Amino acid sequence: MIPIKLSLHNFMCYRDASLSFDGIHVACLCGDNGNGKSALLDAMTWALWGKSRAKSDDELINLGMTDMEVEFEFAVGRERYRVIRKRSKGKARRAGQALLDLQIADGDVFRSIAGNSIRETENKIIDTLRMDYDTFINSAYLVQGRADEFSKKEPSRRKQVLADILGLSRYDEIE
């Protein structure tokens, strides 16, 4: 997965922000504590897998706001994709609302290839990336405060994470 563009609306400390990765091959996020470095990475993982450091999705909504949205554009191979994930807080005793859309570039426009439910769409994202959240945080991104996650796993789970990273399931399909 190659990040292309990240847009945030009311996500954590960001009211409205957009970041283009065009021309960036290696990046270093640096700055004082609390400036939103980890929030950018949380936005990517929340858009793709619906997971972040927060205990609930509502905690990700900017203080005083009632809704949020993350739009993340990325490439896999020669294809360009866009994920749009939204969350609105519920009122009184009503549950909040969530929306997830997976789109593929068709020339200069995107068309939806989402499933019939959020769960189906999340599975399509995992299939597209060939990686789930657990594999991602144990290989490409060490979540703040959880750098030892891989070493704490049971041997069978570590083996599975490594198999997922190396794509060993393809050999099972060929067999």
Image: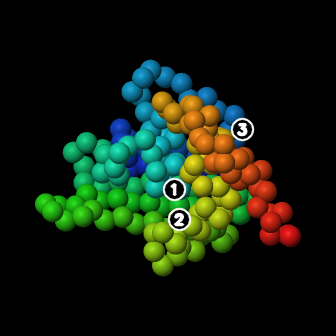
Picture coordinates of residue 105 (x, y %)? 64, 67
Please say if 133 is above or below 155: below
Residue found at the very far front of the displayed protein? 155
Looking at the picture, tell me which residue is in the foreground, 54 or 24: 54
Looking at the picture, tell me which residue is in the foreground, 23 or 26: 26
Please say if 168 is above or below 123: above
- The residue carrying mark 1 is 49
Marker disc for residue 92: none
- Amino acid type of the residue tagged 3 in the rendering: His
Alpha carbon distance from label 2 to label 1: 6 Å
The quadrant in which residue 39 appears is: top left
Marks 1 and 3 in Cβ contact (< 8 Å): no
Q: Earlier in the sequence, mark 2 or mark 3?
A: 3
Q: Earlier in the sequence, mark 2 or mark 1?
A: 1
Residue found at the very far top of the displayed protein? 32
- The residue carrying mark 3 is 25
- The residue carrying mark 2 is 122
**Residue 2 in sight here:** no
Callout 2 crowding tier (Cα within 10 Å): few <14, some 14–19, many ≥20: many
- Amino acid type of the residue tagged 2 in the rendering: Glu
Picture coordinates of residue 173 (x, y %)? 80, 69
